Amino acid sequence: MLSLDEAGQLLRRSTFFRSTPALAIQALAQQSKLLHLPAGELLFKKGDPGSAMYFIVDGCVRVHQADMLVIHLAKGEVFGEVAALSSESRTASVTAKSDTVLLKLERESIYATLASHPDAARSMIEALCHRESEVIDERLGRMIRTKVLEHELEIGQKIQRNFLPSAIPAMPGWQLDGMLEPARKVAGDFYDFFAIPRLQCIGIVIGDVCDKGVGAALFMTLFRSLIRSGALYGGNREQPVGDDDLAGTLRHAIGSTNSYIASTHRGSSMFASVFFGLIVPQTGLLRYVNAGHEPPWIGHPTGVRTQLPPTGPVVGLFEDADFGMGVTEVGPGEVFFAYTDGATDAQNEAGEPFSDDSLQRTFCQAIAQRGPVLETVRRALEAFVGKADQFDDITMVCAQRGLH
Amino acid sequence: MSNELRIAVSEEKGSTPVTIMYVSGDLDSKTYLDLEAKASDVIAGGAKNILLDLHEVHFMGSAGLRAMHAMSVKLKDTGGQLKLLNPSDQVARVLKTLGFDKFFDIHATRDAALKSF
């Protein structure tokens, strides 16, 4: 058991009571209570009313807000002074980290000491100012760290934009269009358009990497680059060109991307749903692989004529996957349209999703208006969402074939 | 708001022991790490074969599939297996669209699932 003398000596060591005369300290120690707090026990929680401050005689406490640690305080330190010296409630919760012994000092006895010994106020005010300056430093530090992180993310955002096509290839008689609206600074969605001159076709890619944020963004750059590189530079480019080469190019690009990510990044379990199509402008022939992606549509003014369901699993997980292949045609006046689920899941301020039906209806109305389809759909979606938060990246691509 | 994820675990001691994980709630980007963490504990505790009972998972996002793949990779490395039991309609649809139905053993009844290990 702590004697009054010992308690007084301990208090004296605290910066709060440095200028308090010995007699006053002794009086304060007399009115204090010794408290044993077993490890893990909560002393008070944020928002509680409180009229006492505590001096740590032995042990260590966690000052926290919910699960987030604010600071660890150990032997010789004081806490709870804000609620004890004012009418504020507890500004944070305190839990014993180890078995802890505390001296509990009540508001009345502290103020009584101050009233009878004005000198004692000096060290207490100094200690409070010191703590205030520490809090300000900490807050400034946190603001600076946040700014640095934000700046890094902005750099990431700029670099990531270079992984989207800067210019969409010209395709006579067609209008190609793509958009990506990230939910956060960086996106896990991607799209791509590129010409493959040797096959006289245009490649269209849309993909959605699982998860969100920086991790998904890093993988997005990998998926997009491997697919483009596999399509442009892979396979045997010396052979004469025929329709089979479209299939061969698709198979190689998706197959090699899948094998690479599934084996090299096996431990990450990262994957993407990908639609990769090759369109021959003259004939409207569309050969494609749909790797676990929302079925794209081919539509005309009166409705969606056909959907292009998955031909294989998502890319990046199953090393021995077989991706299959589909073939169709985009007829004169028809529009090919693909999207990620961010478009159909986009919520309005009431929390309702845009839905497949609305997207399809908007798409057909846009075709009927004979204007740029993607821009019309984008505006309708924007009007629906209003001021609601965007949860997921929204990506759409389309290829509109002219009537002649 | 996602529905809180709850996971209960039980052991089935047969000729091939199977750990059954009953999952309920939403399995999405906010909760998938809870499943991964629980599965890691179970695997660290010696489980080789896990049957994931999904009949009370009413929403599964791509992050949930990611967690299942991570579990299956870990189990394969120890010579074990992950199998799925009784997915709800929404979950079954997601499994099919993303092609997971071809790579995971999915069973409609608990007995059939346990016998298949």
Image: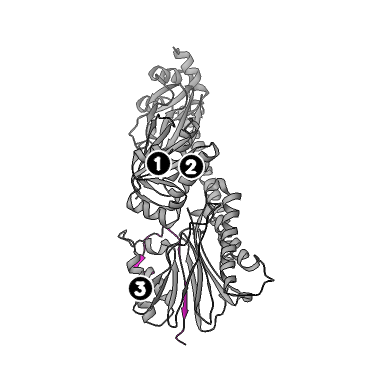
Q: Are marks 3 and 2 on the same chain?
A: no
Tell me the residue at 40%/64% (across/down). A343
Which residue is at the front of the view, A142 or A122?
A142
* Disc 3 to disc 2, C-alpha distance: 40 Å
Labels 3 & 2 near each other (Cβ < 8 A): no
Asked where in the image residue A167 lies, by quadrant, the reply is: bottom right
Is A85 on the left or on the right of A173, as rendered?
left
Name the chain letter of the residue that bears numbered label 1: B
Which residue is at the front of the view, A140 or A403?
A403
Q: Earlier in the sequence, mark 2 or mark 1?
A: 1
Magenta-colored span: A382-404
Q: Which residue is mark 2?
A: B71
Residue A47 drawn at (x, y percent): 35, 37
Name the element at disc 3.
Answer: helix
- Check disc 1 and give the amino acid type: Leu
Is A44 on the left or on the right of A16, as rendered?
left
Labels 2 & 1 near each other (Cβ < 8 A): yes
Q: Which residue is mark 3?
A: A362
Report the number of numbered marks.
Answer: 3
Q: Which residue is mark 1?
A: B52
Q: Nearer the viewer, mark 1 or mark 3?
A: 1
* Disc 2 to disc 1, C-alpha distance: 10 Å
Residue A312 drawn at (x, y percent): 48, 59
User: Mark 1 Cα within 10 Å, few/some/many (few <14, many 20+)?
Assistant: many
The reply to whether the magenta stretch includes residue A384 is: yes
- Check disc 2 and give the amino acid type: Met
Name the chain letter of the residue that bears numbered label 3: A
User: Mark 2 Cα within 10 Å, few/some/many (few <14, many 20+)?
Assistant: many
Residue A50 drawn at (x, y percent): 34, 31
Residue A94 drawn at (x, y percent): 42, 31
User: Mark 3 Cα within 10 Å, few/some/many (few <14, many 20+)?
Assistant: some
Which residue is at the front of the view, A329 or A295?
A329
